[in-house]
Amino acid sequence: MNEHLLEPTRTREAAVPPRRRERSADERLCLHELDPDAVIDHLDSPSEAVELITFGAVRETCPRCQHTHLKLVLRQRRVRVAHLFCEQCLGCYDASYANGAPALCI
């Protein structure tokens, strides 16, 4: 009985180009700070924490903190307006494109 060992065959892998690219001026977001009381309903006592559901971090960083990536918060039970949120300084931001078009609307 003959035994044959299979040797792994080398497959040629194509180089994957990086996904990052420079954004044009039209694609960059302009951030505008929002008053948290205008964005979030505080119906209970001021000492009670409001539970927010975030939908992941975005590539934009907080203008105040300079290093913290903002989180996307969509409208929900106590959130009146979709916005970007900084967990570090608790800032709320609206985003628009350079031409003034809103970036957080569907």
Image (tube, rainbow, N blue to C red):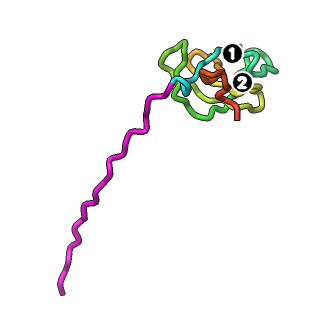
Assign the N terminus to one quadrant of the image. Answer: bottom left
Q: Is the magenta stretch mostly helix, strand or loop?
A: loop
- In the rendered image, which quarter is residue 85 located in? top right
Q: Of label 2 and label 1, which has the lower sequence position?
A: 1
Residue pointed to by mark 2: 50
Helix, strand, or loop for circle 1?
strand
Q: Are marks 2 and 1 in contact (CB under 8 Å)?
A: no
Q: Give the range drawn in magenta.
A: 1-24
Label 2 sits on what residue type? Val
Q: Residue furthest left?
A: 2
Above-or-below relation of 11 to 93: below
Q: Does the magenta portion include 20? A: yes
The location of residue 44, given as percent across then percent down, is: 80, 20
106 relative to 71 in the view: left or right: right
Above-or-below relation of 38 to 16: above
Q: Residue furthest right?
A: 43
- In the rendered image, which quarter is residue 9 located in? bottom left
* Residue drawn where x is 71% and y is 24% of the image: 50
28 relative to 9 in the view: left or right: right
* Residue drawn where x is 70% and y is 22% of the image: 49
60 relative to 106 in the view: left or right: left
The location of residue 100, given as percent across then percent down, is: 66, 21
The location of residue 83, given as percent across then percent down, is: 67, 25
Q: Which of 101 and 51 is in front in this view?
A: 101
Assign the C terminus to one quadrant of the image. Answer: top right
Label 1 sits on what residue type? Leu
Q: Tell me how far mark 2 sits from mark 1, CA to CA.
A: 17 Å
Q: Which of 105 and 26 is in front in this view?
A: 26
Report the disc number at residue 34. 1
The location of residue 69, given as percent across then percent down, is: 52, 24
* Residue drawn where x is 55% and y is 31% of the image: 57
